[in-house]
Image (tube, helix red, strand yellow):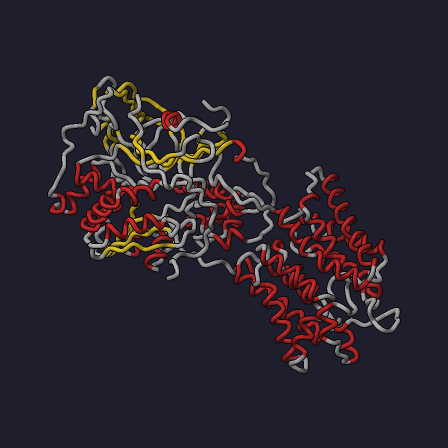
Amino acid sequence: MPQRLVVSVSPHIRIKGNIRRMMWDVVIALVPATIASIYFFGPKAIYIIFVTTFSSLFTEALIQKLGRKPVTISDGSAVVTGILLAFNLPPGIPLWMAGVGGAIAISIGKQAFGGLGHNIFNPALVGRTILLISFPVVMTTWSPPRFVPFDALTYATPLTALKENGALTPLKDLFLGNVGGCIGETSALALIIGALYLLLKKHITWHIPFTFIATTGILCGIFGGALYLLLFHILAGGLLLGALFMATDPVTSPTSRSGRVIFGIGCGAITALIRLKGGPPEGVSFSILLMNASTPLIDRFIRPRKILGVK
Amino acid sequence: MKARSFRGGIHPPEEKITSSLPIQELPLPQRVVLPLSQHTGAPAQPVVKVGERVKTGEKIGEAQGPISSPIHASLSGKVIEISDHPHPLGPPSLAITIESDGKDEYHPDIKHNNEYFRLHPNEIRQIVKEAGIVGLGGAAFPTYVKLSPPEDKWIDTVILNGCECEPYLTCDHRLMIEKAYEIIQGLKIIAQTLEVTSSYLGIEKNKGDAIRAMREEMRNEANMEVVPLKTKYPQGAEKQLIKAILNREVPSEGLPLDVGVVVQNVGTALAISEAVRKGRPLIERVVTVTGRGIKNPANLRVRIGTLFQDVVDYCGGFRGKPGKIIMGGPLMGFSQYTTQVPVIKGTTGILILPQEEVKEVRERACIRCGRCVDACPAGITPNLIGKFASKDRFDWAREYGVLDCMECGVCAYLCPAKIPLVQLIKYAKAQLAGAKLES
């Protein structure tokens, strides 16, 4: 007679994948953009990434310890938040400020709501937005990438250049990342490589990135004055970083496919509205945060069609 | 041609390690334990007493009420006990234990009927009912009830289910190869009873030999067709099968009858053929004994009531230490706490997972990845229903379609947070059923 049989409710087999693997896959997907950020902005980029990641991990562990909860920093989610926050910071930011950003992202953006899975807003964007409001000058001062022929202390991002001077940055520079901006947002190529990995691993679906990018591009192309601006608007600013890595955060986006389509279109429309009519040159962060807030509503009204029933 | 299918689903490792092993006969056990409840509906009532001698095939339990099924002695011998005994589907329940006299003498009423095709549908229904036939795919719903649709339902199609989409299980697969003729006779009897003209047999594409065998046997039959289906779980679920073959959708909380269809498992068709043509009640079935925790996996023809322990012993015992013993497949089967439970009518398989394959997993918070939603064949939102159930919001669980769930396990299989979604759903259903009883 066998001893100690395990008795549990079906199913008795499960996939190997788990949240930790998903999160570390996201970290892997962010490696190309990390390399690009170091390439274009020098060692400062890796310092920023290191500081925000460490501060995110430390804050998460501290809060969980104080709250007498199991410390779950090995699940990789705080690392993802740290790297994404760093990607959304300008290269000239003082390191202490980046550290504060990581602490805010985890404490207010994530743990205040109950930790992973319970937060309403993308934690990295909460961190970035609070920094932007608190330190508006630092957060909008851009130093040039290393491969710009002239020496300057400040430098305009492609979107600022367009909004203020009507100047167009060459698409090739936008695609490779040789432009001013947040450290992780400039290289479209690196971001796309990372996102393809996530698509391949089925951690994200095409719904949000495609609708987000297409909506922004089309609206900016139609209402931005000239149709050829479509590609410019897709490659410039934080659109690819936001659409591929931030808006696709499963926790803060709708669960159904059709819900995700609505979410992506909403993000795209708000981004285009801010870019074309708003004060700031860029609106990706705000658009995602606003749609994060609408996610519970979308999930409430958009449900998959019940198909086959069993009595 | 693209294989037909349904929305959602999964394709887990197939693990059909016994698919090429012919069905063997398990030697008569010393004793059988026959629970009086082996079917959906009311338990049967014992009609024998302790000490009484019975013959193989003799009725020992009488059906009670409109949905029930009789129980028959699966070997000849003496009734030695009528008491509670461990049951593979729940708490110990009333069972009749028969000790074999080793002779396996059949009851004299069991005789062939060569004129069976002249039988009136109602006579067939009576035979099927009296033979104790229930759905052998696992659900064990009394078959005569399915063969007696209400007057107002127009049935035009019979679908025979040969999908066997659960990993590991191969009993239906082997039956289709070895008993193709009998299965088709069973299908004809079902069609004759329901007075329908079109019949289909759905088989997943991974069983090419079964598809060929059934097609070969069917070549001279009119109005009968084998439909190869995509290998995808849960292809064998009634409503998914109907969708795949006929593209008809059974309404939410409805039945196949509502779209003019009756679905029967291939094993059930065989049992019907045996009962109608040969007069044999349901006293044996084919069971797949499988998994990496058993020495010699096999497909066995087993008398109902044989204890799991006897089956395991015949298969050479456990390999290593068993971690889980499951009645049925890995996705919908029931784990057992003892090997003293009997094989019942709905036992499709005995799956033994070794200890190293049974890992305790830590549950995490849902990260709303939506994999369960995308893959749910019923088109409901298991993540939200699970959340409602864990907060005892059964009204919301119901609103979000918990009653449309067939507990196929796709959601929990995929969940990266390892949330026991099926358990939560079963809990919510039980609470809703309880509330309904009270009101």
In this view, the residue in front, B216 or B328, is B216
Quadrant containing the N terminus of chain A in the rendered view = top left
Residue at 75 percent of width and 78 percent of height: A168
Of residue A158 and residue A38, the one placed in the foreground of this image is: A38
Q: Residue placed at 68% from the left, 82% from the top?
A: A225
Is B17 above or below relative to B321?
below
Report whether A257 appears left or right of A232: left
Residue B389 position in % (x across, y down): 51, 44
Residue B296 picture location, percent across and down: 41, 31
Q: How many labels does the image show?
A: 0
Residue farthest toward the bottom in the current orientation of the protein: A225
Which residue extends farthest top?
Answer: B51
Q: Is the residue A263 above or below the residue A103 in the image?
A: below
Q: Measuring from the top left, give residue A277's x and y in whole percent.
A: 70, 76
Horizontal side of B292 relative to A64 (left or right) equals left
Q: Does residue B300 sit above or below A53 in this rendering?
A: above
Residue name at image x 83 percent, y 58 percent: A44
Does B134 appear above or below B95? below
**Identity of the residue drawn at 79% across and 69% down:** A180
Considering depth in this image, is A166 or B217 the residue closer to the camera? B217
- Regarding residue A141, the answer to whether it shows in the image is no
In the rendered image, is residue B329 in sight?
A: yes
- Relative image position of residue A53 (x, y in whole percent): 76, 51
Q: Nearer the viewer, residue B276 or A70?
A: B276
Q: Which of the 4 image quarters holds residue B102?
A: top left
